[in-house]
Amino acid sequence: MLEKELKRTVTEYLQYQQNAGNLMWFPMNSGKAFVKRGDKEYKIQLCDEGTADLLILRKWKVGVFCEVLFIELKSARGRQSPAQGSFQKLVESQGASYSIVRSLEELEKVLSI
């Protein structure tokens, strides 16, 4: 499955789960975006290079308000870049979870839904 197909499948699944009240999710786009409004053009800095594709928040166990998960989507052959590896180390040092997901089934395992 191509990464863009995986992204579409995963985002549809996550939206369903959010609508059911099981979690909240946010796309985490990196790079820059250019927006034109009238005769002015604005450059917007998005997330830093290496940031995971998705941020998921969900209720967790008793005594813990929520679980924070970062998900990096990859095709079957896709590799993690050095910037993505650095982001993973930063995330995990803060106690959050980071997973590389290559299929909807892998995401379901990560979420245990």
Image (spheres, helix red, strand yellow):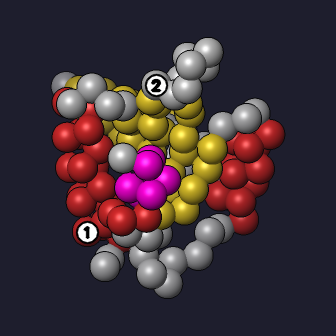
Residue at (43%, 64%) from the top-left corner? 106
Check the image and report above or below for 94 versus 32. Answer: above
Q: Which residue is mark 2?
A: 59
Q: Amino acid at mark 1?
A: Glu
Horizontal placement of 33 versus 80: left or right?
A: left
Check the image and report above or below for 100 versus 32. Answer: below
Image location of residue 18, percent across then percent down: 27, 32
Viewer-proximal residue among 63 and 10: 63
Tell me the element at label 1: helix
Q: Which residue is mark 1?
A: 5
Q: Quadrant of the N terminus?
A: bottom left
Residue at (36%, 65%) from the top-left corner? 105
Q: Pointer 1 and pointer 2: residues touching (CB < 8 Å)?
A: no
Total numbered labels = 2
Residue at (36%, 47%) from the top-left corner? 113
Tell me the element at label 2: loop
Horizontal placement of 1 versus 16: left or right?
A: right
Per the rendered image, the range of residues in magenta is 107-112
Horizontal placement of 52 versus 29: left or right?
A: right
Image location of residue 15, percent across then percent down: 23, 39
Q: Is residue 49 in view from this perspective?
A: no
Q: Residues within 10 Å of mark 1 (few under 14, many from 20)?
A: few
Distance Cα–Cα, label 1 vs label 2 = 28 Å
Check the image and report above or below for 12 versus 79. Answer: above
Q: Quadrant of residue 68?
A: top right
Residue at (19%, 40%) from the top-left corner? 16
Q: Earlier in the sequence, mark 1 or mark 2?
A: 1
Image location of residue 86, percent across then percent down: 75, 54
Q: Residues within 10 Å of mark 2 (few under 14, many from 20)?
A: some
Task: Look at the magenta stretch and give its main secondary structure.
Answer: helix
